[in-house]
Image (spheres, rainbow, N blue to C red):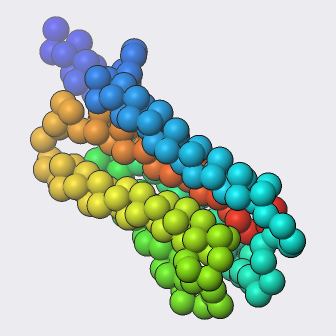
Amino acid sequence: MTQAVAQRVAKPREPLRFNKPSMLGVGTMVWLGSELMFFSGLFAAYFTIRANRTGSWPPPGIKLDVLQTGIFTIILVMSSFTMQKAVFEAEHFRKRSARAWIVVTMIMGLAFLGNQAIEWSRVTFSQSTNAYGSMFFIMTGLHGLHVLLGVVAMAFLMLRLAGKKTDPGELAALQSVSYYWHFVDVVWIALYGVLFLLH
């Protein structure tokens, strides 16, 4: 009897996974649907202005650092993998490792924002220079705000995961933030393609 109990105790716990999305996860996905419509409106406005523009697009004098921003785009995309790694670690009850991967993700997100600030300080145009300048600052600025909100959400996750006791809702919260972060990354890929590569 004692040996059977010892075997049950020694047996590793099964990973904690949901058979269906949590209510928080469903709510997050519905909200992200509205965010998708919001960014779709921005893309529609951009292409409408571009289609009705006479002359070259973008206007003369628009120069962007495609290579440097491309490097930080890769960093942001890689942060999706580190965020998903944090979810995986939390599912396997490795909270310390999950926190470490969240920190790595936060650093990558802040590095991306730092590069965006540098990009803004170097461009030779402003939001009032022309239509391209307006759309550039609106689209990259709103995306940057979403990245910042994601980093703040991760900071709150760190507080929630700080204790040794398992919080029943912490995995759902972590997964919801990961959905948001993946969305932010995908939106930036589209923005980088439109503003930096296709212009």
Q: Report how many numbered discs are placed on residues in the image.
A: 0
Q: Residue at x 67, y 71 (%)?
A: 132
Task: Find the residue positioned furthest to the right.
Answer: 55
Q: Is residue 137 visible?
A: yes
196 vs 18, nearest the viewer: 196
Quarter of the image for the C terminus: give it. bottom right
Tell me which corner region of the image, top left, top right, bottom left or bottom right, holds residue 174.
top left
| Horizontal arrangement in the rendering, residue 151 relative to residue 116 (left or right) | left
Q: Is residue 89 visible?
A: no
Does residue 25 lie above or below 163 as drawn?
Answer: above
Task: Find the residue positioned furthest to the top.
Answer: 1
15 vs 9, nearest the viewer: 15
14 vs 132, nearest the viewer: 132
Residue 157, x across and y down, in percent: 25, 51
| Horizontal arrangement in the rendering, residue 107 relative to residue 167 (left or right) | right
Residue 9, x across and y down, in percent: 22, 24
Q: Residue at x 65, y 90 (%)?
A: 124
Residue 94, x across and y down, in percent: 32, 44
Quarter of the image for the N terminus: give it. top left
Tell me which corner region of the image, top left, top right, bottom left or bottom right, holds residue 25.
top left
Q: Residue at x 16, y 36 (%)?
A: 167
Does residue 180 lie above or below 49 as drawn?
Answer: above
Q: Residue at x 80, y 83 (%)?
A: 60
